[in-house]
Image (cartoon, rainbow, N blue to C red):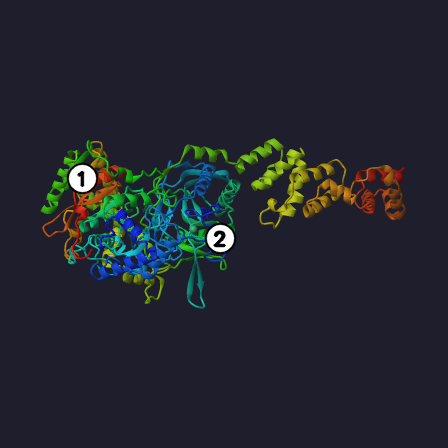
Amino acid sequence: MQDILSSFEHYHKWLREHEEPVAETAGFLTDRIRQIEPDIHAFIRLDKERIVCRGRSLDERSQGGALWAVPVAIKDNICIKGELTTCASHILDGFRPPYNATVIEKLLAENALLFPGANMDEFAFGSSCETSFYGPTRNPWDLSRIPGGSSGGSAASVASGEVAAALGSDTGGSIRQPAAMCGVVGFKPTYGRVSRYGLIAFASSLDQIGPITRNISDCARMLEVISGYDANDSTSVDSPVPKYTESLGKQIKGMTIGLPEEYMGEGIDEDVRRSVTESVDVLKRLGAKIIDISLPHTKYAVSCYYIIAPAEASSNLARFDGVHYGYRSPKSDDLIDMYVNSRSEGFGKEAKRRILLGTYSLSSGYYDAYYLKAQKVRTKLSQDFDRAFSECDCIVTPTAPNTAFKIGERMDDPLMMYLSDVFTIPANLAGLPAVSVPCGQDRNGMPVGLQLMARPFDEEALIKVAHAFESETAYHKMFSGGCG
Amino acid sequence: MSDIYETVIGLEVHVQLSTRTKAFCGCSTAFGAEANTQVCPVCLGLPGVLPVYNKKAFEYALKVAMALECDIQKTVKFDRKNYYYPDLPKNYQISQYDMPLAYNGKITIEDEEEGSIDIGITRAHLEEDAGKLMHDEQQAFSYVDLNRTGTPLLEIVSEPDIRSPEQAYEYLKALKQTIKYLDVSDCNMEEGSLRCDANVSLRRKGSEKFGSKVEIKNLNSFKAVRDALVFEQLRQEEALEEQEKVIQQTRLWNEQKNVTEPMRTKEEAQDYRYFPDPDLVPFEVAPEVLERVRQSMPELPRRRKERFVNQYRLSEKDVEVLTSEKPLADFYEAVVSEYNDPQAVCNWVKGEIMMHIKDRPKGIEDLGLKPGHLASIIEMSKKGKISGLAAKEVLRENLDSGKDPEMIVKEKGLEQVSDKGELESIVVKVIEQNEKSVNDYRGGKENALSYLVGQVMRQTKGKANPKLAGEMLRKKITG
Ligand SMILES: [Zn+2]
């Protein structure tokens, strides 16, 4: 009973057997979440009435759709018409978008059951889900630990069995890193593959929406639904979307998989290294050819990212000024005060830190030294990948250098926190598709993630390899104690 | 203006492109709608939305670029200009910074003393407009209307090649005329679709170095531009003569007081933190697009003037009027193509037609006059079928009812009487009734005859052929 959400297939079977209206199922699922939530806090808000209402509207439609009644948690930075959407920030207090994000339209078209309000780091600034204005999310495997971030709520909601899938957004690893730390599958599609229309931007040139699921086949289903060109997004790419589910169950014999030396060096937790090495052996056993490759500019990726992402964020977040919507400070005498007070009171510490960083690196006199230089490094990094992909079909690395750490452990050490994303950031800078799949456990029983990266728009390669790996291992079936 | 100093003026002109929809969304750009009714999540800059550029605005800008003989950027890139203002919902403006769509162009103006001179165009770039603030002084509230937000603008920046307020005036005139010829903006200054800021400085004649520059804003008519520059020129000259320093600043034109005044601003240097807009992917200007725009270019004012002089053998002065606006020039040519007497048509257009289109907002288009109708009126008049007086009446009737001129002549019985038999009795009657004038004429007063002709015209309600009537009268009186 408790594991009805272990896969879409399983859930659909259960639905058929029980023949209950979706409205009732929606109520039942919400109640289940309510029991789990005091421990996890994966959701900022949970409005049972609205969720049951959505279930009822599904009952009124004919059954069908790839995601019929599938409960999907929605990260709080993806706009849903009429639904509170706050980016876990005080400054967006009370904001209800008058429109749906394109991915939401697509989920609704396939009859998914939406669970909005998944917790996150404020404006997706963070790697631990601790900067949410509404309080941190906890890791279902160990409640004293972080779930990773920024899509921590999305990952924890799937890992704890609250929902069957979630949408997250990934700017520097915000889907993959929490997926790894929560022992679930997290997929960042190629930049331009999924429309960003309706995703409240963090860094426009890096952000991409993607699914978090319990297994790779559900992930492929989600991906099939949300991908595709969108005329409302000029960065979205007009190329046909393959049927990703057809890549499931394919042999990986003969594929070449690159192992970059830069990702297995110093600073990696021993248990992570061991799990990844064992996983590479599994891939070898499955017939893949493993080769050593080099991505020499990887060491600049984090610095480069922390120039570009805050620069874009500082501009993207300028619209939150207390004038048109969201939080406005009550104590202002003139316009400048209104801006200053609203933003001072509305944004959290990390958001302010990034806005300052970005403002600084874009200001005249520093632009060339920082922003422009970072863009040049970004190009070099992409070229590294181009070279690597001329030799291999896929790259395998750890998703994060360590497993989930304790809540509060890195809050006062932003640099250490930023290093959590050292392996995930390069894929964002180069716009590549990348996935994290569970591949082991550390000495504390915390999950380890394996990251796979592929050529732009070759999501199929990732699904193929990840599915082959998953079929050969049982890590995705391991479950956290007590919460499921 | 003394002989010691030289005025250096550069103009920044914002032209609102007359696309039906905004620069980055599908909202209407119509002027005068109720506040905040022409807005959508995109132009409101709501969280999560993305801009998608308007291809039409881009083509309109290309037209202007070609007309101003600019080089055209191969790759179009948009940048963000970051600054806070409540009428700017994203708190950045999408604009073009280091790669303007068009650069390095020129426009020719007429200077009274120097004749034709070229004014360089530094650059022309696309950007989005901001909204409007409305202040309620009574309640100490301010309201924001975002209808105008996102309307496409083309900013055209001139080189500091302008040497006098008169030249600035001529520059604006030439620019407006050219843009209106292209039909990409109505250039209406009152509605804000053409806005101008002026940079002005003085320097010693012969000096290469520029003086301290003053920027004048709030110029909302051609006259204001000229007047403000005249004022500023004098003000700066006086300052220099008094050995005072001209402060580099922004000043506003106060139309009531006829002076420029320093703008109240906090003394902070603006840092716009320009950077490429990551939401808008740069794109190459396709050769097909360039070709299509090139094909759609109309004949521009200067070229058309030259052709009119050569082809129709008209005077420069006449041509100036006829080509002042494209629709008028088009209309003129349409009439000539129906009735090939360029000078006669010119006289009619310059005279009677201009009188009728005076005070009409759109000019000739508002008149609803068919070129064929005017051609037929002129032809009837020239051939003596109707008198000049009658012709004017036919035109008036045609403008009122749109009826065919020949029908009007027939219905109103305006056909000129050129039949001696018909006129005979009237001529006799006029001679009988105007003994005094008849005697005057006999006594050698030539004027008396025109009076008598007038009487004939009157009695025939203008239908008599005046030439014939005169001949008959003379014969009867002297014969
Ligand atoms: Zn709009």
Residue in front for this viewpoint, A382 or A142: A142
**Screen quadrant of the C terminus of chain A:** bottom left
- Kindly identify which chain the residue marked by label 1 belongs to: A
Where disc 2 sits, the SS reads loop
Q: Position of residue B12 (x, y in %)?
A: 43, 47
Q: Position of residue A384 (x, y in %)?
A: 21, 36
Q: Position of residue A383 (x, y in %)?
A: 23, 36
Residue A184 appears left or right of B95: left
Where disc 1 sits, the SS reads strand
Return the residue at label 2: B220
Asked if B216 appears above or below A470 in the picture, the reply is below
Residue in front for this viewpoint, B161 or A170: A170
Do the CB atoms of the residues marked 1 and 2 lie less than 8 Å apart?
no
Q: Is residue B154 visible?
A: yes
Q: Amino acid at mark 1?
A: Val
In front: mark 1 or mark 2? 1
- Residue A466 location, quadrant: top left
- Residue B57 location, quadrant: top left
Residue A94 appears left or right of A416: right
Q: Can you tell which mark lies on residue A396?
A: 1
